[in-house]
Image (cartoon, coloured by chain):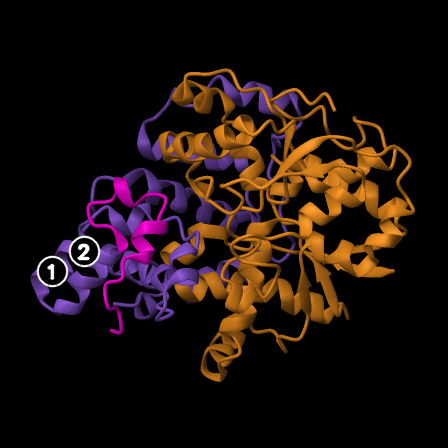
Chain colours: A orange, B purple
């Protein structure tokens, strides 16, 4: 299996362990990831907060490059990038907007590249096929945390159930773990306010962490670099707000799968987290 | 506007209690159509605290795209220079983020933090976290640059730096 790959900026920097675990499990699954040449940043929250045309041009350039490279399907592990690319594709179905953005880019753009997230890639690969690669069952009780951008807005992303998504839960059960019903599956962690309003991130992420802790989660499983870094890197600020010492680790779904495949903690980037991972 | 004030957006908004006006109140202010109320909205912190988590639009029975409206209102607030003090660190972060993309094509996290500190004078913020981020291999000392940086500058010149398209 061969598929286009857009890592995005976080995966090359502050969330490189997500990239490492995606690459490590892709190798075991014999999925060849073909990186988009000369890719740029998707613009994230900054672009759409400041200028609409900029927020459409940046993702459009990425998809135009994928088209040029002949990639028909592209996997985007970062939930924020995935969301921006899908939203742009949707906005550019409008003829006027599309021709304006093509003029800005000065590149051809068809808009027919299929953009998928990492959970969809694993679903395409097949949960039963994934099960066949498991050597050390991930026997832990965890809270699967989807956040916002992976599942909303449902009308455009059309992925999973919007209020109570299940795809990650199904994967965890497939690799030998157990999941739980909890109240903060899709509540916002504070997203891009990590630096500008750390106080709000601590409050929102604190609510999420506390509920997972109260229900006895051994780990929180995520598929978004912003969710991961807010719940992990901001743990000090969160524990201060909660007046507690919650030490539940926050790991990527790809790291959990990697562990179940018997891949080493170091190769999966599990040593790069702020909250120590002992699973 | 089709809003009938059911309040679902406000009920689901994680930052409603931190906003000057929660989303449904803001919708009502817009419906009145008066200049005074529009100015109230533009100079409120609500439009800057919105995280675009998309919860409201998913639950709105009239499918009103409030997050997209917030994007528009933010550009209006900048254009009319009606900025709530709460917007300052948020805009400083966005500008620092976009500068990095403009010059390198990608996000250079070290540069982003430095530029943010310079813009906000928050010099001591996160000093405890940065060294461990570096030791964990999470920060690049030097930026990664794309090849087509000229193309990137052209995109910026034709969008955010082009006065005609500033949505005014």
Where's residue B116, x and y in %? 40, 35
What are the residue bounds of the magenta stretch? B1-23
Question: What residue does disc 2 label?
Answer: B41
Query: Do the residues bearing badges 2 and 1 touch, measured as CB atoms within 8 Å?
Result: yes
The quadrant of the rendering that contains the N terminus of chain B is bottom left
Left or right of residue B24, residue A208 in this image: right
> In the image, is residue B16 part of the stretch drawn in magenta?
yes
> In the image, is residue B18 part of the stretch drawn in magenta?
yes
Residue A243: assigned label: none
The residue shown at (57%, 64%) is A157
Image vertical order of residue A157 relative to residue A241, above or below:
below
Picture quadrant of residue A243: top left
Asked if residue B85 shows in the view, the reply is yes
The residue shown at (49%, 35%) is A208
The residue shown at (36%, 65%) is B162
Left or right of residue A257, residue A27 in this image: right
Within-10-Å neighbours for mark 1: few <14, some 14–19, many 20+: some
Q: Nearer the viewer, residue A116 or B105?
A: A116
The residue shown at (60%, 45%) is A9
Image vertical order of residue B96 relative to residue A51, above or below:
above
What kind of element bears circle 2?
helix
Disc 1 chain ID: B
Q: Main secondary structure of the magenta part?
A: loop
Question: What residue does disc 1 label?
Answer: B37
Picture quadrant of residue A123: bottom right
């Amino acid at each position: 299996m061969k598929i286009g790959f857009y890592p995005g900026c976080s995966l090359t920097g502050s969330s490189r362990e997500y990239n490492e675990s995606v690459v490590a499990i892709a190798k075991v699954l014999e999925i060849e990831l073909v990186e988009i040449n000369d890719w740029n940043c998707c613009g994230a929250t900054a672009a759409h907060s400041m200028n609409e045309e900029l927020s459409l041009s940046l993702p459009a350039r990425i998809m135009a490059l994928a088209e040029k490279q002949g990639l028909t399907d592209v996997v985007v592990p970062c939930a924020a990038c995935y969301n921006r690319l899908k939203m742009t594709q949707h906005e550019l179905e409008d003829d006027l907007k599309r021709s304006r953005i093509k003029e800005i880019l000065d590149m051809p753009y068809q808009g027919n590249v299929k953009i998928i997230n990492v959970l969809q890639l694993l679903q395409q690969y097949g949960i039963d096929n994934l099960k066949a690669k498991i050597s050390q069952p991930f026997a832990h009780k965890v809270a699967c945390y989807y956040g916002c951008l992976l599942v909303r807005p449902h009308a455009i992303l059309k992925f999973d159930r919007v209020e109570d998504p299940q795809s990650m839960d199904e994967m965890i059960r497939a690799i030998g773990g157990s999941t739980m019903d909890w109240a903060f599956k899709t509540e916002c962690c504070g997203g891009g306010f990590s630096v500008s309003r750390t106080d709000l991130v601590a409050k929102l992420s604190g609510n999420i962490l506390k509920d997972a802790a109260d229900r006895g989660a051994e780990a929180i499983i995520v598929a978004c670099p912003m969710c991961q870094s807010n719940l992990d890197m901001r743990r000090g600020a969160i524990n201060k707000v909660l007046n507690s010492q919650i030490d539940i680790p926050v790991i990527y779904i790809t790291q959990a799968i990697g562990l179940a495949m018997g891949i080493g903690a170091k190769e999966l980037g599990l040593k790069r987290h702020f909250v120590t991972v002992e699973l | 506007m089709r809003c009938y004030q059911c309040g679902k957006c406000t009920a689901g908004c994680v930052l409603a209690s931190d906003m000057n006006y929660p989303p449904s109140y803001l919708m009502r202010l817009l419906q009145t159509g008066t200049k005074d109320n529009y100015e109230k909205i533009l100079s409120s912190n609500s439009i800057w605290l919105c995280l675009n988590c998309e919860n409201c639009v998913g639950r709105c029975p009239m499918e009103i795209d409030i997050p997209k409206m917030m994007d528009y209102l933010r550009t209006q607030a900048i254009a009319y220079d009606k900025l709530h003090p709460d917007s300052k660190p948020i805009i400083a972060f966005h500008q620092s983020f976009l500068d990095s993309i403009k010059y390198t094509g990608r996000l250079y996290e070290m540069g982003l933090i430095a530029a943010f500190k310079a813009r906000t004078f928050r010099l001591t913020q996160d000093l405890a976290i940065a060294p461990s981020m570096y030791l964990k291999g999470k920060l690049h000392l030097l930026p990664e640059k794309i090849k087509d940086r000229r193309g990137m500058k052209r995109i910026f010149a034709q969008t955010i730096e082009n006065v005609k398209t500033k949505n005014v």
